Image (tube, rainbow, N blue to C red):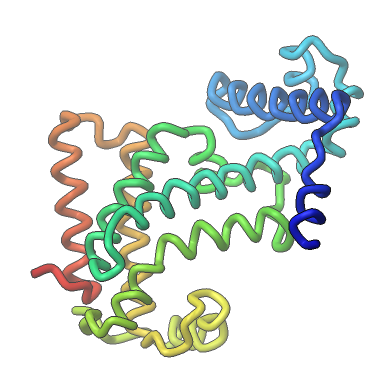
Amino acid sequence: MSVMSNESEKRTPTRRERVRAATIDEIKATALRLMHDQGSTDLRFSDIAREMGMTAPALYRYFGDRDELLSALVADAYNDLADAVEAARLRVPVDDPTGRWYAVSRAFRTWANSEPQQFALIFGPPVPGFVMPEEGPVAEACTRAITGLKAYFVEALDQGKLGRPLIRDVDESLLGHLKDKQEGMIDHSDLPPETFQAILHCWSALYGFTSLEAYGHLHFLTEEARDALFASNMRLAAIYSGLPTD
């Protein structure tokens, strides 16, 4: 009975629905291309419409305003990042949390370099006048990406493989914040504050290197030299965070 019900729910989209979906995809692709050409994440409907041979009012049949389009693009970016990170993490055995950290960090870097517009949307300067939605698809996609970027710590802790981080003092200001936010942010109430701080250290190292590279500040080095520097940075992060490195 349930099988028949599921099959009945998988109906073929109508031609009108397919055309609408294709137009939405084209709008998003055009917006990302314009961001690349302009060197900015700010968007104007008039520019998108002109590129697509449409009128600006016609775009409002697909997106209520610029912020709705930006929200859709941000959600797509977070989901793409989450897919890349999750695929990389799952290719490494679960009993190798440090290997998963290396795989996840490489996937993040590769994604940032291959999708510069998406990277800029979620990790670059804020778009003027745009406020990131705290609920809905954007928040859900963001949670997916963050979960993949810290899951190896929880796995190492559960397996008894996570040592104490090198820096164990947590400032009172950060400690108070963690007590309020820890459960919702890391999905593991037993993770010690100093370890959560170590997660933030790892994230800062990963994001910092990736941003420097993405915006061209490390291009005085050869590609091979950047690869080596990145690998040593991520190994250093594993060492000071308590992940096993032997």
Quadrant where the N terminus sits is bottom right
Question: Which residue is at 29% across, 76% downward?
Answer: 156
Residue 197 screen position, x and y as percent: 36, 76
Q: Where is the C terminus found, in terms of image quarters?
A: bottom left
The relative height of residue 19 versus residue 50 in the rendered view (above or below) is below
Query: Which residue occupies the extreme front position in the image?
Result: 1
Residue placed most toward the observer, 160 or 149: 160
Residue 69 location, quadrant = top right
Say how many tags the image has.
0
Quarter assignment of residue 190: bottom left
Residue 194 vertical placement versus 48 (above, below): below
Q: Residue furthest left?
A: 246
Q: Quadrant of residue 175?
A: bottom left
The residue shown at (13%, 36%) is 225
The relative height of residue 31 versus residue 180 in the rendered view (above or below) is above
**Which residue is nearer to you in this view: 35 or 190?**
190
Residue ID at (29%, 86%): 169
Asked whether, in this view, residue 166 is left or right of residue 190, the answer is left
Residue 102, x across and y down, in percent: 25, 55
x, y percentage for residue 117? 52, 33
Residue found 28% across the figure and 81% down from its top: 159
